[in-house]
Each structure stands twice: as structure tokens, then as C-alpha cells.
Image (cartoon, grey):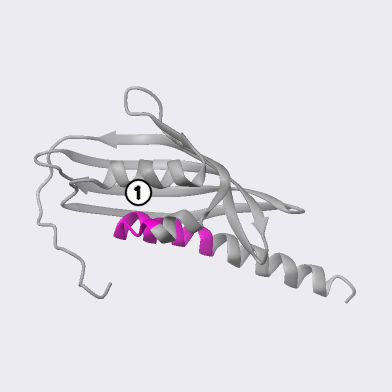
């Protein structure tokens, strides 16, 4: 019974980490820059793929600027994230998140991928924030796809 408080803390930490991953996907999908800022450590690193499609930024402000640049002119964008195994070591955690994204725009630009995000998070009060988030492509498609994108409801 003596380890029940530590097991409860681990459960709460894992839930908070999953919430951080969900807030990342939600804020990227909705281009909510304030929420996106809130998931980063001040010096957090954001790495997306490798050349020729690679992107890199460091620092919460720069990470928000990178998202703003990547979302500019998108008629449609969605990110789905499935957290994998979470390993917590004190005030730091690592996880792999399995991600799928689809986007169209600006113009006739198309983008779909499957990737793994290799995440390092750090405790920030009762929450967790990304110290590093590195997306490694497993599959990338930039060919045209069919379908119709719809704007989000105004209250969303």
C-alpha cells in the first residue's frame, strides 16, 4: 500500500503528458497560437523531418512563429496524435507520439504524412511542457488528393 501515492502521481503525470500532446495537436489544427505557446518550455526545440522538408526552431516564441509560417494560407489542416509509451524520470519524461497530418494550401499544395514524434518533456508546476519535439517522417505524400475542406465552426 505504501507505493499508492507514487502510483497516483505517476498516473496524474501520464495524464498531464497526454493532455500536453493533445493540446499540441488541437492548437496546431486550429492554429491557436496562444495554446501552442503554452505547451513549450522557454527553450524548447521543435524539429520537423530532415532536408528537403526539414524545419527547426528553438524557444517558445520561435516555435509559435514556425507554426504560424507552416499554417499560413492553409485551406485545410488536421493533426491526429496517438501517444505511445511514456517514461517518467523525476521531472523529465520521454515519449513517442504517432502522428498523422493532412493539409491543403496555399493554392494547389498538398501534404499528408505519418511520423513519429520523439518527445522530451519537463515538469512545469503541475503540468508538463515540451523540452524537445522531433518529428521523424515514416511516410510523406505531397501529391494532390480529392475532397473538400470546410472551415471550423466560428466558436471552435
> Does 21 appear in magenta?
yes
Q: As drawn, which residue projects farthest toward the right? A: 2
In the rendered view, does 29 fall on the left or right side of 48? left
Q: Nearer the viewer, residue 35 or 53?
A: 35
Label 1 crowd (10 A; few <14 / some 14-19 / many >=20): some
Query: How far across and how far down the image is residue 143, in percent?
Result: 16, 35
The x, y position of residue 80, in whole percent, is 36, 56
Residue 150, above or below 140: below
Quadrant location of the C terminus in the rendered image:
bottom left
Displayed quadrant of residue 15: bottom right
87 relative to 129 in the view: left or right = right
**Residue 76 percent across, percent down from the top left:** 19, 53
In the image, what residue occupies the spot 39% across and 35% down?
A: 138
- Where is residue 105 shown, x and y percent of the image? 15, 44
Taking 77 as reference, is 57 above or below it? above
**Closer to the camera, 86 or 122?**
122
Name the residue at the front extreme: 61
For this rendering, which residue is in front, 43 or 17?
43
Classify residue 145 as left or right of residue 63. left
Is 33 left, or right, of 95 in this rendering?
A: left
- The residue closer to the viewer here, 81 or 107, is 107
Question: Mark 1 highlights which residue?
Answer: 100
SS at mark 1 in the image:
strand
Q: Residue at x 80, y 68 (%)?
A: 6
Q: In this picture, which residue range is highlighted in magenta? A: 19-33
Is residue 24 rendered magenta in the image? Answer: yes
> Measuring 66% from the left and 67% from the top, which residue is drawn there?
126
- Predominant secondary structure, magenta span: helix
Amino acid at each position: 500500500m505504501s507505493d499508492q501515492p507514487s502510483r497516483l502521481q505517476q498516473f496524474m503525470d501520464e495524464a498531464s503528458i497526454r493532455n500536453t500532446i493533445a493540446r499540441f495537436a488541437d492548437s496546431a489544427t486550429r492554429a491557436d497560437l496562444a495554446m501552442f505557446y503554452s505547451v513549450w518550455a522557454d527553450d524548447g526545440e521543435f524539429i520537423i523531418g530532415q532536408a528537403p522538408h526539414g524545419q527547426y526552431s528553438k524557444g517558445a516564441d520561435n516555435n509559435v512563429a514556425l507554426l504560424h509560417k507552416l499554417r499560413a494560407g492553409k485551406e485545410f489542416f488536421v493533426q491526429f496524435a496517438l501517444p505511445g509509451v511514456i517514461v517518467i524520470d523525476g521531472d523529465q519524461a520521454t515519449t513517442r507520439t504517432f502522428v498523422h497530418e493532412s493539409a491543403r494550401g496555399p493554392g494547389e499544395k498538398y501534404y499528408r504524412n505519418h511520423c513519429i514524434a520523439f518527445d522530451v518533456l519537463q515538469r512545469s508546476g503541475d503540468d508538463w511542457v515540451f523540452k524537445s519535439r522531433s518529428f521523424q517522417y515514416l511516410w510523406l505524400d505531397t501529391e494532390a488528393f480529392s475532397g473538400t475542406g470546410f472551415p471550423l465552426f466560428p466558436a471552435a
